[in-house]
Image (cartoon, rainbow, N blue to C red):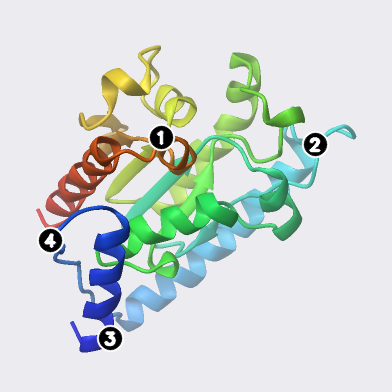
Amino acid sequence: MNIETAKLHLETSKLMGVNFLPVGIEATPTENDSDSNIDKQSLLEQLCATHDSSCPLCATPNHTQAVFGSGNPDASLLFVGDAPSVEEVQRGIPFVGETGEKLDQIILAIGFNRDDVYISNVIKSRLEDDRAPLPTEVEQCGTFLQKQIEIIEPTVIVTLGSVATKYVLNTNDDISRLRGQWGEFRTIPVLPTFHPAFLLRNYTKENRQQVWDDMQKVISKLKQ
C-alpha cells in the first residue's frame, strides 16, 4: 500500500467513524484475467440487451431507462441494492449521489475501488415515487440478477438493505434480523448489511460500526 492509498484509507475510516484500517485484497492481473473480463463483459452486455427488450417489468412504456449494473465483470465482490433512483437513471449508473458516495467510502475502506467490484440492483428501472417494489415486481426483474451472478461468479455477495437481502437469500426475514449473518446463494457466501441510504438517514456511531464490522467479515471471507 503506497502513501496516497494509505491516506485515502485513513480519511475513509474517519468518515466511517472507526479508528483502524482494513487490510485490502491485492491482486495482480494476468492475461487470463483479461480474457475472462472480456468474455464476461460480452455476456453481461448480451444479458442487458435481453433484459431491456424482454423484462416483464422494465420493458414497458411506463418504466424508465434501465440501470443494469457497473464495475468489474470478473469481480470477486458483488454489491446488490434494491432499485435505481432518479439520479441513477439519469446517469445510467447504480449508486450515485450521496448514497453512491457513501458506498464508495465503504468500498474504499476495505481496500477496493469501485472499478474493482461489481454493483447492481435487484430491480433495474426506477419505481414510481421510489416506492418499495411489490413481490411480483421483484420476481419479474430479479431473474436477470440471478443471471448476472451466474456470469460474474463472485466470491462474495453483499446485499444492501431488505429488498436485496430477501430476494437473494429467498427469505421473509428483515434486514434488522439478518444483518451481519452469513447466508448463501447457490453456494456463494452472502452477507446482508444496511443500505447506504439507510446509513445516511440514521448516521449513528452504532450503525456505522455495524456496517464496518460487516465489511471486516467480508474481507476475512475473501482471504480464505
Q: Disc 2 or 4, which lies upstream in sequence?
A: 4
Q: Residues within 10 Å of mark 4 (few under 14, many from 20)?
A: few
Q: Residues within 10 Å of mark 2 (few under 14, many from 20)?
A: some
User: Which residue is label 3 attached to?
Assistant: 4
Which disc, if any, is residue 20? 4
The kind of residue on which mark 2 rests is: Ala
Which disc, if any, is residue 202? 1
Q: Disc 1 or 4, which lies upstream in sequence?
A: 4
Which disc, if any, is residue 59? 2
Alpha carbon separation for disc pair 2 and 3? 44 Å
Between tags 1 and 3, which lies in front? 1
Q: Disc 2 or 3, which lies upstream in sequence?
A: 3
How far from the left and from the top, in percent, is residue 125?
Answer: 70, 39
Viewer-nearest residue: 56 or 104: 104
Alpha carbon separation for disc pair 2 and 4? 46 Å
The kind of residue on which mark 3 rests is: Glu
Q: Disc 1 or 2, which lies upstream in sequence?
A: 2
